[in-house]
Amino acid sequence: MTIDQFGIHIGDLLYLRFYGIILVTGAFLGGYLASLEARRRGQNPDLVWDAILWALIGGIIGARIWHILTPPPSMIALGMTTEWYLTHPLVITDRGVEGALAVWNGGLGIPGAVAGGLLGLYLFTRRARLKFAEWADIAAPGLALGQAIGRWGNLINQEVYGAPTTLPWAISIDAPYRVPGFTDPVLKFHPLFLYESIGNLLICLALLYLGRRYASRLKAGDLMLIYLILYPVLRFLLEFIRLDSSELFSFNANQTLMAVLAIVVMVVLSNRHRPVRRHQLKARSAE
């Protein structure tokens, strides 16, 4: 057994990448937190482990699709465009095994992961005849926790870093993983993955607090809606200092999506809790 920068070699065939180990750890701990939430709400916690398989499959597929549709400029410069991904499921290059299916190399978009994971959860709840909104609330804090842990996989792959900085916690990036134009070996960069990890942890704690403090006021699905406001706002802000941001139609793909999503969900959440007016009460009573 040997260990290198990216993983553990066990024999000649098995290679455990730290990136994958970290993602699985995040998913497990997020699922464990969700199981505690399910038990607290009087639900069967064992269902969480059935649901998480559906959510993980949907999340990985969605995350990879989003990355393929919005590759960052540094990958486009290497020829790894959307068209290249769609025509190269797996290919051996001088950098190793790459292609649309090579998820172990990184390249998982969080927006796609959340969308795919929620779709997987919806399909599971429909199959099991459970209420999707209730289980989305159960999943929300665990989702944020899983993201907080999973972001550390970006440190291993030397990705998701920000603009150059001289702050004490700045990180070094090896030459092969630097964005073009930032080749000076003296440069260090914002650890954007760390900022997002801390932000996600705070979101997790906020959701746990709100779910307990305001349980009588919240409607089913509110916690997930709050997550869909807090995380997009966090991501929108961090994109201002991120290097190598994905683009779609000349716009920052992630930042634009996050802004639209946060605004739409805020409107939805506000409408759900809009006070019922007197004439509406009379109309309901007349019915």
Image (cartoon, rainbow, N blue to C red):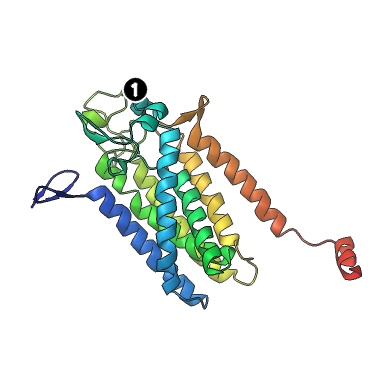
Quarter location, residue 29: bottom left
Q: Is 78 left or right of 206, judged from the image as shown?
A: left
Report which residue position mark 1 lands on: 77
Quarter location, residue 263: top right
How many circles with numbers are drawn on the protein? 1
Write the residue at 29% across / 38% down: 170
Classify mark 1: helix, strand or loop.
helix
Expressed as whole percent of the image width and height from the top left, the position of residue 59 reads 43, 51
Write the residue at 37% across / 25% down: 76
Quarter location, residue 246: top left
Expressed as whole percent of the image width and height from the top left, the position of residue 277 reads 84, 61
**As drawn, 134 above or below 225:** below
Local crowd at mark 1 within 10 Å, few (<14), some, or many (≥20)? Answer: few
Asked whether 51 or 111 is in front, the reply is 51
Write the residue at 10% across / 47% down: 12
**As drawn, 271 above or below 45:** above
Question: What residue type is disc 1 on?
Answer: Ala
